[in-house]
């Protein structure tokens, strides 16, 4: 005995024709485009600031503090702590999870953060460095740099990411008086 299998193909055919009256004019409707959007989100860590969002350094004295280029040691450093949470499931194949740091830098100094509209002129601003879990400081971060959180294709761990910020003088004449202001923007990035 031979069994015969048959396939059933189901479909819908939709046709449209212009609506016409028997003896009247052809009626056409207006057309318009319709745009459809689907946002696809990938799982990522939640990044939050665990430090105060405003930090103030003590006053710098023009003559005393601007003799030696580098960090103004008398003013000390400030700790910045970011907190990562909900990182489980956030790894992405082929990319490196990182925290990207942006902010306005002083013209000619891509690792010296300062708003250009400050009343102070000269190579004076804020420097930012990453501090690893062993307390080892990295080099000064340039605007747009990223701090890697895991290897390529890896998943960052929940926990704290630490930085320090200091006031830096990089030479030349400092003119004016008033506040030197800068900001750092931190965001999760996958490179």
Image: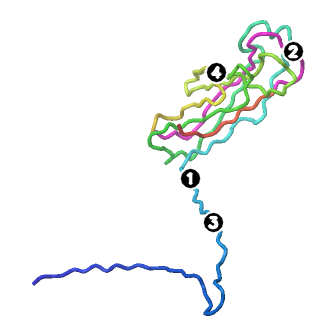
Nearer-N-terminus badge (2/4): 4
* Gap between marks 2 and 4 measured at Cα: 24 Å
Q: Is residue 44 above or below residue 165?
A: below
* Secondary structure type for disc 3: loop
Residue that numbered label 1 is attached to: 41
Q: In this figure, which residue is indicated by the disc labeled 2?
A: 175
Badge 1 density bin: few <14, some 14–19, many ≥20, Cα 10 Å: few
What's the residue at 60%, 35% (across, down)?
99
Q: Nearer the viewer, mark 3 or mark 2?
A: 3
Q: Is residue 57 left or right of residue 155?
A: right
Q: Residue at x 49, y 79 (%)?
A: 14
User: CA separation, marks 4 and 3?
Assistant: 51 Å
Dot 1: element: loop
The label nearer to you, 2 versus 4, is 2
Q: Secondary structure at mark 4?
A: strand
Depth order, front residue of 81/173: 173
Q: Is residue 173 magenta?
A: yes
Residue corresponding to mark 3: 33
Q: Residues within 10 Å of mark 4 (few under 14, many from 20)?
A: some
| x and y, in percent, of residue 30 in the image | 67, 74
Above or below for 29 versus 138: below
Cα–Cα span, label 1 and label 3: 26 Å
Q: Magenta segment range?
A: 154-180
Residue displayed at 44% across by 79% down: 12
Which residue is denoted by mark 4 in the rendering? 140
Which numbered mark, 4 or 3, is in the foreground of this view?
Answer: 3
| Location of the N terminus (image quadrant) | bottom left
**Residue depicted at x 83% and y 13%:** 174
């Amino acid at each position: 005995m031979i069994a015969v299998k048959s396939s059933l193909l189901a479909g819908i055919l939709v046709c449209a024709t212009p609506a016409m009256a028997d003896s009247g004019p052809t009626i056409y409707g207006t057309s318009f485009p319709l745009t459809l959007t689907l946002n696809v989100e990938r799982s990522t860590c939640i990044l939050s600031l665990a430090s105060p969002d405003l930090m103030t350094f003590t006053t710098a004295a023009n003559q005393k503090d601007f003799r030696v280029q580098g960090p103004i040691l008398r003013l000390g450093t400030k700790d910045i702590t970011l907190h990562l949470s909900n990182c489980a499931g956030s790894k992405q194949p082929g990319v490196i999870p990182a925290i990207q740091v942006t902010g306005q830098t002083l013209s000619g100094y891509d690792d010296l953060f300062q708003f250009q509209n400050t009343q102070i002129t000269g190579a004076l601003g804020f420097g930012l460095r990453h501090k690893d879990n062993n307390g080892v400081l990295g080099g000064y971060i340039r605007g747009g740099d990223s701090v890697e959180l895991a290897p390529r294709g890896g998943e960052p761990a929940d926990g704290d990411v630490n930085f320090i910020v200091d006031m830096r003088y990089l030479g030349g004449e400092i003119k004016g008086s008033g506040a030197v202001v800068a900001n750092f923007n931190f965001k999760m990035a996958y490179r």
